[in-house]
Amino acid sequence: MKQILPKIFKVICITVVLSFFQQLNAQGIGPGGVSSGLSMWLKADAGFSENSSTDVEWQDQSTNNFILNSNLVSGSDGISAPNFNSNSINYNAGITFDGVDTGMSTAINTVNFNFSNWTVFSVQAIKNNTISNCIWHYNNDGKNDLALFIDPHGDGFNFAVNNVSDGIITSPTIDDGKPYLVVHTSNNSATSTFVNSDLVNTGSVTVPLPGNGAFMVGLDADGSEANDGDNHLDGDIGEIIIYNYNLSNVERQKVNTYLALKYGISLDQTTATNYVSSNGTTIWNATTNVSYNTDIFGIGEDTNSGLDQKVSRSVNNVNSPILATTQHFTEANSDALRSTSLGDGNFIMMGHNNGSLAFESSYNGGSNNLLSRVWKVDETGTVGNVYFAIPKAYYNFPSSVIPVVVMSDDTTFSNTDTVVNLIDDGSFYWAEINPSDGQYLSIAFTEPSFTVSKSALTIDENGDTDTFTVVLDVQPRSNVVIEVASDDTDEAMVDTATLTFTTSNWNQAQTVTVTGVNDAVKTEDSATITVSVKDADSDDVFDVLENQTVIITLTNDDASFSLPSISNELISENTAYQSITPSLSGDAPIGNVVYTLSGDDATKFTVNSETGVVNMVARDFENPEDNDADNKYNVTLIATDTKGNSSNTSWFVAIIDDDGIEVLTQIGLEADSPDTVNSVVTVEQLNTIKNLTGVIEANETAYQDYIDANPESFSSPALLSEVQSMVNNVNATLGVTKNQTESFVIYPNPVSSILNLEFNNTDVGLVAIEVYNTVGQKVMTKTQDKGQSIDINVTSLKSGVYFIKVSTNKTEFTKRIVKE
């Protein structure tokens, strides 16, 4: 019972597997979607099982379900089992034969290839080209009824049909270790042989093939059916496909596409040859990609072909790029890590222009930094992001650069194209990309750099600001930290000490704000802002970059200038006023000057903000509008420059009644220029001033003397209030009223020493004499009991005008004298 159970279990498993593949073929699953007439489909990634080192089986995936087993090979060589390699040809499985004693066969008389027409596809890679390698062999009597032989190097390869060679083919050689897609077709009597879709031989043979034979893989038969011969395969087989009719060109092209895409084989483009999916869609257009048809490869999914290629490269060159759906570049296509498929009908394929792997072109302002080899993308359906990798050992980049993959809509590769950094994982440079259909792709390198938008700024020192920006010119592999520092924070400060650029925001300019710092120095100052890479926190290739600087010029905002004094003015009522045009002195103002007004009565004036000319409309004396209602309008003019420096001057404009204006003007002129204006203000003139009271005729000379002695007490023209004050002061000092009359004479006048005083009336009592200077100070006194004449010695007085006051028991009066 213990011996029977394993056999029963094995039979059950085989039955289940057979049933599964029968269902697949019933659903139309076949190479390239061509399932009709499919007589044998041996593929390494399906139906191969190992029981022991000498017992392996390989199950045909066609509806015939042939079983090949190493134990079914007869003979005395002691056949061993070939090995299964999950990552043999372009990440796909292969069955490995050792060239000595490994092989497999069906049972005898079980295979009936009694065809007159056929199409055979075979994918294999030869490891030892010094021996005669038999890839596969069909026979019913030990003869070469239909077989593929690859002879020692230089001797070519051939198909044998009914024990006759269909022609030795020496070009191309297919024994260099690379996988080749070999196709043999028969149309009753004419045959054709293709290598990678290129027709390499035609022949004629005797048909049909015999029936009821055995099919062997990895060796030929000698002497009898399924008997071990002397031609063993040293290499790997990926797939063997046999149809019982001569496929049409379209059908053959679908199967070719399936096998080429799966095994990384480039279909020959001597004659433009499209890649076509199982539903007839062109997934690589040989016409539009005519200049980019070298080393064609790609990935994609085609359900009707049973194809789900998740990783691929061209098997023509070890330096070929890799396309993958996940970030895995060495694992087998069937590895569990490859969890992503593109989905049925979605493909991305590439071919290149046969350019060299040297950086001989220029890109983005660089020199010799773009690979001469350019790939073109042909995308079908919706692919999205894929992974692109190149083997590090075959691409030599200069030191201190960033390897990138560049995707362009044309071959100019300008700096507006999509650039993605290649990540170095030690074995590969890789990147996740999403190229568009028809785009061009190449490898380049960028030299790290950053740009500061301005090299100089000019700002005002008093808190003024300006900005510059910093941006990386190329994408870093990791963060780049830029330090920003001012060499003199007493002159200029920056708002940030560091700027951090990541792999995401590297091309987004970051702003630095510079602020001027005020000082009291009236000169332009300067500072230097240094922008540098912080080595410890930055991508190493950026560490070598030189610092950049921004020179800051700080304009002075201090200016000392002055407005001129503007004279007070007395104007008649109902007369408009206009000031002079002020002219500034001192330092030149900074920027524009704006004139404004202030003061109690500022609203009663207007000012031209550009010229500083002040105006006031005509005012009515009887209806004052000034703040104090005294017809004296006070105003202050302020001049302010752009930086806030200012100067001001104040004055007033007095409105007077029309009466008395001439004498008020005269008084003002005399007060302004007592040494040059020589005139006399008479009592008659004073009496013309409206509202002036208390004018005494006897004090006429004293009034004039007061004006001459006190010019600072009068405006120009004089104000009523100022003249009234003069009259009151003189009258009070002299003690004279209008009713008093003169009753004495004084002589000589002017006097140098002795002044004589004689009374007209001798009937006087005690006489008191007082002498005052022009400011009202008493400078001399004298008393005398009685007498008609009195002598007064004035020798001690200084030269000038004086007032002598004489008081008696009957009268009091004052005279003006001049001391020489």
Image (cartoon, grey):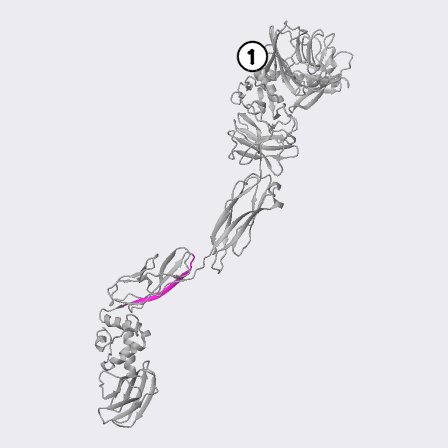
Q: Quadrant of the C terminus?
A: bottom left
The residue closer to the viewer here, 320 or 135, is 320
Q: Quadrant of residue 679?
A: bottom left
What's under tag 1, amino acid-wise? Ser
Q: Quadrant of residue 624?
A: bottom left
Position of residue 361 relative to residue 228, above or below, is below
Q: Quadrant of residue 212?
A: top right
Q: Secondary structure at mark 1?
A: loop
Position of residue 634 relative to residue 786, above or below, is above
The residue closer to the viewer here, 39 or 602, is 602
Q: Is residue 645 magenta?
A: yes
Is residue 556 rendered to the left or right of residue 166?
A: left
The residue closer to the viewer here, 141 or 719, is 719
Position of residue 417 relative to residue 690, above or below, is above
Q: Position of residue 196 (x, y in %)?
A: 61, 17
Magenta span: 643-654
Is residue 784 rendered to the left or right of residue 424?
A: left
Q: Position of residue 166 (x, y in %)?
A: 64, 8
- Residue 718 visible here: no
Is residue 379 rendered to the left or right of residue 757?
A: right
Residue that numbered label 1 is attached to:
248
Q: Quadrant of the N terminus?
A: top right
Q: Position of residue 559 (x, y in %)?
A: 43, 60
Magenta-colored segment: predominant secondary structure: strand
The residue closer to the viewer here, 722 or 247, is 722
